Image: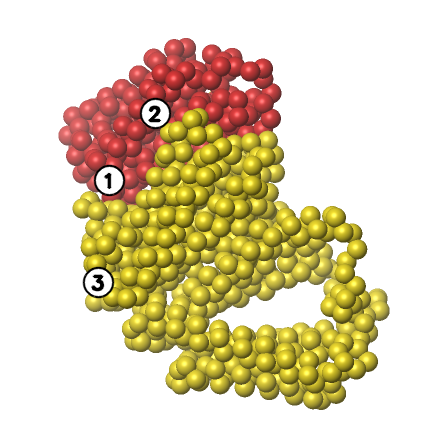
Chain colours: A red, B yellow
Amino acid sequence: MIAKLFLAAVFLPLYPLSIPQNALVMRMKSPWLRAILLLVWPQIGVAVLQAAPADISNGLVIWAMASAGFYALRLLTVRDLGLWASMLASSALALVWGLAANGADVWSLRLFALSFSLPAALLVLLAGQLTLRFGAAYSGLYGGLADSQPRLAALLVSSVLAAIATPLFPGFFGMLTLLHTLDWGFDFGLLLVWLLWSWAGFLLLQGFLFGPVRQAARPDLSGRATAGFVFLLVVLVLAGLALRGGGL
Amino acid sequence: MMNMLSVLPVLPFALFLLSSVTATLFSARLGRRVARLSVVFSVLATMAALLELTLYLREGEPHWLSSGAAWGSLCLDPLSIIMSVVVAGISLVVHVYSVRYMAEEPGYGRFYILLDLMTAAILLMVAAGDLVTLLVSWHLVGIVLYFLLGHDQTRQASQRYAFWALITYRIGDLPLVLAAVLLYQSFGTLALPELFGRIAAHPDATTLLGLPLTETVGLLVALSAFARSAQFPLHNWLPYTMEGPTPVSALMHAGIVNAGGFLINRFAPLFVHTQSVLHLVFAVGLVTAVLGSVLMLTQNDIKKSLGYSTMGQMGFMFVECGVGAFSLAIYHLIAHGLFKGTMFLGAGGVIGDARRHDGVPHDDVYTFVVERKTDASRLPWLVAVTITVVVPLAILGFSHWLVSGHFVGQQGAVILLFFGWATGAQLLLATHRLQADSPLRQMAMIILSLAIVVVAYTLIEHGFGLFLYPDSAMRDGLYAAASVPLGVFGVMMGILTVAIVMGWLATYSSKSAPEWRPGRLARARLMLYSLVSREFYVADVHGQLTQLVLAASRKLNLLARWV
């Protein structure tokens, strides 16, 4: 039982067991592999957690909240988009423990995990596109994406907003569910984590979107690729509204 | 007719949303015609809001529109209807103004998309019929505002201050989230009318740690409203948002920043059962009003001065809520929105005129305001003082007695009358120094103007109160919730009177002996001026705290080796 919980803590990352996930994401070169890892990793965690017969203790929830807060605070000074997406996933996916501790069914856990891992996966794919064009996906290194690459900029904004649980993305409703489920003492911590995500998200965006264009002109994202990203985001919103709408 | 009334609340919001979506999808094909499209949708939405108001006035009753899902419902009540008309109307003016004003700016289409989205979010917020819809729209307003304020993407300052606004709004969002969760946990419903019904049935319900629910939730709602309406010490973002485009400043100061007053009114059925939250609202509002007015007087930038003036006005709006005059706060919000919107949209013209004509007009008002020349021909001192003290009191007392006899018995009403009297007295005291051929005639005209303004204000406010809160028990209940023990009230009024009279004496003393006198008082004044000119160091404190958090984050990342 302990071994299963330990394994679940690797896949639904609790610091320091979250280190393998972030190290793997940073080691992988292919954006697609990174995205698949971010999507599959927490789903394995949910499956392992379901297989563990024991109730989740309050201590584990405290550990999960501390881990989420730890990564949320660190996000503030992360400038690499790929690492940022991975750390945000580490922060958000730790919260699955809070839902699980209060008896949420496996379907709710999978949806909650997906509502954060899918935006993170989209972000690593966008990081791949930025690396192709500029050699790195680093906030503050080159500005003015909003003017020079409007499609890429719009997708980046939407994905970051989805990742930091902004309405109408499913993460927002997931956070409401979690707040309703947890004890009030945890609610304060959760709200602080949410605030830190927003702070970090907009700091990251500012470094990419604004300021004068410092690079030679690069082609924007193709129409087909844009349509693909938009489709995924629209599906995310609609699925969130249909499956998690209301949250409370 | 009732079916039409049922569909209408959706229309203003839906039209702006449709405009935004259409402009996004066809922006490449539409080019600059996107502005025309947006204005057309804006006109239609304003007409829908006006029709909604007309139909409601004729035969409407408040009702609730369900979306069929757990959330997404709308509330059709006097508050949502009047706010929809105001928001749609001000947005229409801003839309039309921006057609030419923003024409030379990059991102013309994007501006209109965001403007439509912002208006849609505000309209959804004012018509929200359940907690989740309210939360969704409340969050969206802050997010869209960030992108509107940062419209000029090459200016660092506009990005920085847009970020300030965003973070303050996010800090304010969280108490409202917690309030919604506590309410849902206690009463098991999201729908606002049902929720308020259950609160009325169980006003003594308790929540976490056995705290009274209405008091706790009321405090959380008030905190959220403070951040949204720039109350001290969460005010710093407001004057600096002038870095955004002027039409956005107009929309923000005329509409968005008023959301705090709206929120408190929306939760009026909850505040009626609170004991002390409204006292906090009053205190915060008063401090904000005083500081906002002081900071406004020390600015040399017209837009920043208007920004601090808005802060002061927001403070007054919270003072009104804090004394239980909820409908007056909404009336104030609308009146302030209209005149501040006009001032912002006219600010560019004023600056342009000042650049074209460097000489200021040398008329009587200029001489009075700038050169401070005393008039040889004016009313005797004793007559002026008597008029100053007695006339405003008589006008205010009479007009309030006229509309509602028992109103003057309420503590909140007494405070409002007192402030009204002090303002009127100050006006007369200041204007009696104006140069005039016939000082008596001039004073008579001023008194007549004051009487017209006060009586009209009182009558409109009274009508407004009856429209927004037709239930007299509710109106009285709000005043009762805001009242304090009689002894405390007496002491408070005494302190206020002493403060105002001391202020008048200090002004009189400085006017009668304006030359610089070194000494302890002069040093204290200099220190006070330094404090004011540094805006009470609030921004510095915020900056230091931010740097501390960022330094901690950096250190943690280094320790954890970025994994």
Q: Position of residue B374 (x, y in %)?
A: 80, 75
Q: Quadrant of the C terminus of chain B?
A: top left
Q: Nearer the viewer, residue A105 or A15?
A: A105
Q: Amino acid at mark 3?
A: Arg
**Mark 3, residues whose alpha carbon is within 10 Å: few (<14), some, or many (≥20)?**
some
* Callout 3: SS: helix
Is B410 left or right of B150, judged from the image as shown?
A: left
The nearer-to-camera label among 1 and 2 is 2
Q: Earlier in the sequence, mark 1 or mark 2?
A: 2
Q: Where is the N terminus of chain B found, in terms of image quarters?
A: bottom left
Residue B313's spot in the image, x, y percent? 54, 62
The residue to which callout 3 is attached is B198
Asked whether, in this view, residue B446 is left or right of residue B418, the answer is right
Task: Report how far apart the C-alphas of labels 1 and 3 lie in the structure.
Answer: 24 Å
The answer to whether the residue labelled 1 contacts the one labelled 2, judged by CB atoms less than 8 Å apart, is no
Residue A41 appears in the picture as rendered: yes
Alpha-carbon distance for marks 2 and 3? 43 Å
Mark drawn on residue A230 = 2
Marked residue chain, label 1: A
Are labels 1 and 2 assigned to the same chain?
yes
Q: Are marks 2 and 3 on the same chain?
A: no
Residue occupying image coordinates x 26% and y 46%: B72
Q: Is residue B536 left or right of residue B416?
A: right
Instruction: State the residue position of label 1.
Output: A245
Instruction: Name the chain letter of the residue that bears numbered label 2.
Output: A
Q: Which mark is residue B65?
A: none
Rendered position, A154 above or below B362 = above
Disc 1 residue type (three-letter): Gly
The lab-note entry on whether marks 1 and 3 share a chain reads no
Q: Amino acid at mark 2?
A: Val
Is the residue B555 above or below the residue A58 in the image?
above
Above/below status of B484 relative to B357: below
